[in-house]
């Protein structure tokens, strides 16, 4: 009888191990630059959890979100996916995400090991939908050769100012870096804005609601805010400070010819224009450092944002997290993977690839060291994050898709020159605020 019991126990263990060995989970992300780092995390995770394998899949931004949202309906969404602050509230409201708060309490997972404020961004109505993986700020990216040719030093670029009335010294630098076909810059009286061969700046314009890399770093310095805070319900797109700032950006092209036209940016984005030597400067996020360094056929520099009317440089502070799909058939394994992604071990691995700034400081230190060894100075991004009052949070909100639809169609009209900002933004703001009544 004892022998039978032993055999039964052994058989049970074999069956359990066999079942465990078959556990495979899907993990999606959208940034191809980060895929190698997370494949390394996946391999390290499986060494610690031999019964679980993680398939890491990368999809481009548009295909990624289409795949996620259609997958929720068709049952093909990944077990775990990189989530964005602009998306998760809607997913949570539609019960598509696992509330991991009870799992965190059960496993006593620390949430105070991340950069201040990051973990709190993923809590809605007392439920938690992600653990932080990284953070980002924005800075000025410039062509070192073009800057030198224009007689602008990096020190001067790091000490520019901006205002929505005349653009300050920031606009003057943009004008000086803009050259027409005759070699005249934008400050010359006979500058030909209809025949520009080199733009001083390229903007993505940000025809939407958050303007992270396009205008929020300007509008915030006027004292303007999207709304009253996280999950705010009263927007300020009709505020004169916002209206004036957006019109200033539009007029850089429409009246002055210093930046590529909105329609041209839709066909060929500002980053592509920059690496193609058609623009001297862009503003973008820290997640794009590797892109610019690897793809620019010239030396790239990173500079501080201009100071605004409030005397400060200000950047949106955004952070991503990993979420578990509520339809996952492998939730236990998915939770183990999410915990590992949010651990110092995985984030130090990610940091060692020098692609993004992880949510844990030790990972940031590793990323900075890797980039410094390559001769890349990224203090314009890290200094912004550490400066008291130098950042503001991404406008996490309900009704994000509807708000974005309203603002996109309105802002496009302004950037195309079909409407003045003062004539259309107040009405658009009324439509946005009506969504919350």
Image (spheres, rainbow, N blue to C red):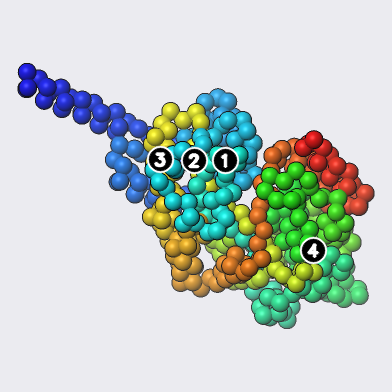
Asked if the residues shown at circle 2 and circle 1 are in contact, with their CB atoms under 8 angstroms apart, the answer is: yes
Viewer-side residue, 134 vs 98: 98
Which residue is under mark 1?
Answer: 126
Tell me: residue 306, above or below residue 428. below
Q: Residue 367's x, y, as percent?
A: 47, 64
Tell me: residue 8, above or below residue 42. above
Which residue is under mark 2?
Answer: 101
As drawn, the label of residue 106 is 3
**Cα separation between marks 4 and 2:** 37 Å
Q: Kindly state the secondary structure of the residue where label 4 is placed.
A: helix
Q: Compare marks 2 and 1 and give the one earlier in the sequence.
A: 2
Viewer-side residue, 79 vs 253: 79
Q: Compare marks 4 and 1 and give the one earlier in the sequence.
A: 1
Viewer-side residue, 249 vs 11: 11
Q: Compare marks 3 and 2 and give the one earlier in the sequence.
A: 2
Q: Compare marks 4 and 3 and give the one earlier in the sequence.
A: 3
Which residue is under mark 4?
Answer: 222
Q: Compare marks 4 and 2 and give the one earlier in the sequence.
A: 2
Asked if the residues shown at circle 3 and circle 2 are in contact, with their CB atoms under 8 angstroms apart, the answer is: no
Q: Kindly state the secondary structure of the residue where label 1 is placed.
A: loop
**Cα separation between marks 4 and 3:** 45 Å
Asked if the residues shown at circle 4 and circle 1 are in contact, with their CB atoms under 8 angstroms apart, the answer is: no
Tell me: residue 19, above or below residue 199. above
Q: Nearer the viewer, mark 4 or mark 2?
A: 2
Tell me: residue 294, above or below residue 26. below
């Amino acid at each position: 009888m004892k022998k039978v019991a032993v055999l039964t126990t052994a058989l049970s263990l074999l069956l359990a191990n066999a079942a465990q060995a078959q556990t495979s989970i899907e993990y999606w992300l959208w940034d191809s630059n980060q895929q190698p780092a997370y494949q390394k995390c996946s391999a390290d995770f499986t060494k610690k959890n031999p019964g679980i394998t993680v398939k890491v899949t990368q999809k481009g931004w548009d295909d990624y979100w289409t795949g996620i949202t259609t997958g929720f309906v068709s049952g093909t969404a990944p077990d775990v996916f990189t989530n964005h602050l602009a998306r998760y509230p809607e997913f949570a409201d539609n019960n598509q995400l696992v509330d991991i708060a009870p799992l965190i309490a059960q496993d006593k997972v620390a949430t105070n090991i991340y950069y201040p404020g990051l973990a709190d961004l993923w809590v809605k109505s007392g439920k938690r939908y992600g653990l932080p993986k990284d953070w980002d700020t924005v800075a000025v990216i410039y062509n070192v050769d073009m800057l030198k040719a224009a007689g602008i030093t990096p020190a001067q670029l790091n000490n520019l100012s901006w205002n929505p009335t005349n653009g300050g010294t920031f606009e003057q630098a943009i004008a000086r870096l803009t050259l027409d076909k005759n070699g005249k810059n934008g400050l010359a009286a006979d500058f030909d804005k209809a025949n520009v061969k080199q733009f001083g700046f390229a903007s993505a314009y940000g025809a939407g609601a958050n303007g992270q890399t396009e205008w929020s770093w300007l509008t915030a310095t006027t004292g303007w805010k999207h709304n009253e805070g996280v999950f705010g319900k009263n927007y300020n797109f009709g505020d004169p400070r916002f209206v004036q700032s957006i019109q200033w950006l539009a007029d850089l092209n429409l009246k002055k010819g210093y930046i590529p036209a909105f329609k041209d940016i839709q066909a060929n984005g500002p980053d592509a224009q920059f690496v193609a030597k058609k623009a001297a400067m862009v503003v973008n996020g820290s997640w794009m450092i590797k892109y610019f360094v690897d793809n620019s056929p010239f030396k790239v520099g990173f500079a501080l944002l201009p100071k605004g009317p409030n005397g400060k440089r200000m950047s949106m502070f955004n952070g991503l997290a990993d979420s578990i799909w509520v339809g996952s058939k492998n939730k236990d394994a998915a939770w183990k993977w999410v915990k590992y992604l949010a651990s110092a071990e995985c984030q130090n691995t990610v940091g060692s690839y020098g692609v993004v700034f992880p949510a844990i400081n030790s990972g940031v230190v590793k990323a900075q060291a890797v980039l410094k060894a390559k001769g890349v100075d990224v203090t314009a991004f890290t200094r912004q994050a550490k400066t008291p009052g130098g950042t503001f949070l991404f406008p996490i909100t309900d009704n994000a898709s509807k708000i974005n639809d309203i603002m996109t169609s309105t802002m496009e009209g302004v950037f195309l020159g079909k409407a003045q900002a003062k004539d259309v933004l107040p009405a658009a703001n009324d439509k946005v605020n009506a969504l919350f009544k």
